[in-house]
Image (cartoon, helix red, strand yellow):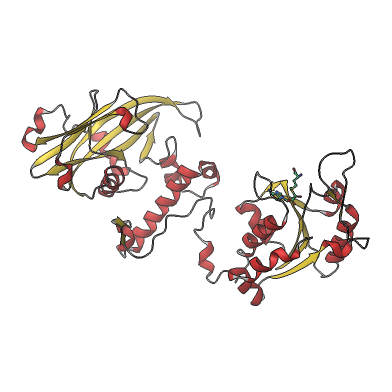
Amino acid sequence: MRFDILTIFPGMFEGPLSESILGRAREAGHISVHLHDLRDWAHDRHRTVDDYPFGGGAGMVMKPEPLFEAIEAITAQDAVPPYRVFLTPQGRRLDRALVTDLAGHERLLLICGRYEGIDERVLEHAVDLEVSIGDFVVSGGELPAMLLLDAVARQVPGVLGSEGSLEEESFDHGLLEYPQYTRPAEYRGLSVPEVLLSGNHAAIEAWRRVQRIERTSARRPDLLPIADLTPQERAALEGDPGFAQRRVGDTIFQVRVAAVAIHEGRVLLHRTAGDSIWSLPGGRLRVGERVEDAVRRELREEAGMKAEPGEVLWVDEAFAEWRSAIDGPGRGEVLLHHEIGVYVAATVPERFTRRDTFRGAELAGTPDEFALEFRWVASADLDALDVRPTRIVPALRGQMAGL
Ligand SMILES: C[S@@+](CC[C@H](N)C(=O)[O-])C[C@H]1O[C@@H](n2cnc3c(N)ncnc32)[C@H](O)[C@@H]1O
């Protein structure tokens, strides 16, 4: 693929074009880059390319004559005419789809503006597309042109060492990439997700897929409508992203996991000031996540502790219930959200043996009237607490199996 760049600062490109991937791609002949100094087409001995704007106003404008003539002369340098791109904050925003389109051209001419921009007649008659790198203004089109060139060159076959590197990269199929880790497996007490050390490739693939979907849902929900998701994944995201949930009629069933910490024959529960019981800590089962993995993650993320979850202690069918109008497909529908609490036994370290009460203000995002009490009780006394025992109805058991 051939790139031509028209600029008054060709020297700016030397470093970025000679190093690393772009440098190697040029050496190997996958791409060629031709730099053109606009001043070579200036008409006076001062090599002037700008002038005052008609109608007054601050700054200078790039003159039409050198631009028209340069674009024509550069076009004639090769049998393939270039697709002519002007970099401007007023252009179409560069994204993955546009990068892919641009990579479909054999030849691109990138025109870099300076000052207040270029004479509008050039845009109307000698430019095919105006492209912006984002909703902010930089001092010239050179850095935007470098970004565009780098992004497009990565799509050219052979530029990236292994073709696979493009796949699963952020924005591939409309999803962000999964989190990455490398050795050591444990550093300053920070460990990497166990599944990545398991050697189980299917489990790793599944984990990465869920991570991609969750990240995209949390950070770039705007990408989700175009993301390449299976109907099941889309259904799981519908309504409240990041929850394991399934819609049946006008009810959304959501699963909430909670670990019940068990230490030396005693059980740690925490409860709200209201009438519902939570264990420590409560959390959401993520899309595609096993209950036990969710408990490990929740304990690590919320309480900073390592836990070995054991058996499911009880399932609370109506952990919480509320109605909401849903935004998204079926916009405006009023749906019943039905939370199912899954309580799992977890063995935790000694430091969680104390009793504690937290006021809402101490817990980020928790309303003030809220209080959590962490209370150890002998496991034999469980019945004495107002914990509702397993009362899962058969119909729900079927729903849960599919979640
Ligand atoms: C200081 S800017 C001129 C901005 C112009 N006066 C306006 O408000 O639209 C000078 C040049 O930098 C380049 N430039 C600045 N921001 C850009 C962006 N977000 N994307 C692409 N090019 C940009 C363009 O080539 C532009 O002509």
Is 222 situated left or right of 80 in this image? left
Q: Up-down: is 32 above or below 51? A: below
Q: In this view, does 90 lie to the left or right of 50?
A: left
Q: Residue at x 35, y 65 (%)?
A: 183
> Of all residues shown, which one is farthest toward the left?
380
Regarding residue 289, the answer to whether it shows in the image is yes
Question: Which percent across, then down, holds residue 243?
Answer: 37, 40
Q: Position of residue 378 (x, y in %)?
A: 7, 36
Nearer to the camera, 47 or 73: 47
Of residue 52 and residue 350, the one placed in the foreground of this image is: 52
User: Farthest bottom residue?
Assistant: 28
Q: In which quarter of the image is residue 159?
A: bottom right
Q: Residue at horizontal 64%, vertical 71%? A: 18
Instruction: Using the image, determine if residue 206 lies above or below residue 388.
Output: below
At 66% from the left edge and 53% from the top edge, which residue is drawn? 98
Q: In this view, does 257 lie to the left or right of 14?
A: left
- Quadrant of the rendering where the C terminus is positioned: top left
